[in-house]
Image (spheres, rainbow, N blue to C red):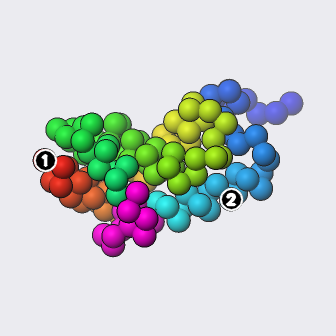
Amino acid sequence: MAPSSNSSPDSQPRPSRGDSVSRRVLEDVLKQTASLYSFEPPTDPGDLVVLKDVARRHPRAPFALDPVVVQLVRALLGRQLAGLWTSEDHLNAVSAQIAETLFENPETNERLEKLWTRLIGEVR
């Protein structure tokens, strides 16, 4: 008998194309995450556009996991890896998991907070 879990398989959607896609998605997400909290200009100007869109939607939101980090991650993943999501729920679930991991890491948390401050300053 398999060990029980607090979450059902339905609560954490996965790519329908198998484990190799899951690993590829994770590798792509890690690369995109690195650009998310760097202070270098994005290699693709469209990335900055979607991040600023998040700041425009939440101009007074204090830096927090939800909605800020979740929405920043979702914006990049939705744009850069658009063809990999089986549904909006899938994209939202993956974004939330990645955002939580980034938010809980002190180094990435600090960088993301600086990025958020910069973004909201640019859209005001």
Residue 91 occupies which quadrant of the picture? top right
Is 83 one of the magenta-colored residues? no
Query: Of the residues tagged 2 and 1, which is closer to the observer?
Result: 1
Q: Position of residue 109 (x, y in %)?
A: 34, 56
Disc number placed over residue 124 in the picture, else none: 1
Amino acid type shown at disc 2: Arg
Q: Is residue 8 above or below residue 80?
A: above
Disc number placed over residue 36 in the picture, else none: none
Q: Position of residue 89 (x, y in %)?
A: 57, 30
Check disc 1 and report its element: helix, strand or loop: loop
Query: Relative to residue 83, is residue 123 drawn left or right?
Result: left
The answer to whether residue 15 is visible is: yes
Q: Position of residue 100 (x, y in %)?
A: 45, 45
Q: Is residue 99 above or below residue 112?
A: above
Amino acid type shown at disc 1: Arg
Residue at 86% from the left image edge and 30% from the top image edge: 1
Query: Relative to residue 26, is residue 65 drawn left or right?
Result: left
Question: According to the image, label 2 marks what residue?
Answer: 24
Check disc 2 and report its element: helix, strand or loop: helix
Query: Relative to residue 82, is residue 113 drawn left or right?
Result: left
Q: Are marks 2 and 1 in contact (CB under 8 Å)?
A: no
Crowdedness near tag 2: few (<14), some (14–19) or many (≥20) residues, C-alpha within 10 Å = few
Residue 90 occupies which quadrant of the picture? top right
Q: In this view, does 39 lie above or below 118?
A: below
Q: Which residue lies furthest to the bottom in this view?
A: 40
Residue at 56% from the left image edge and 32% from the top image edge: 88
Residue at 24% from the left image edge and 41% from the top image edge: 56
> What's the magenta region?
34-47
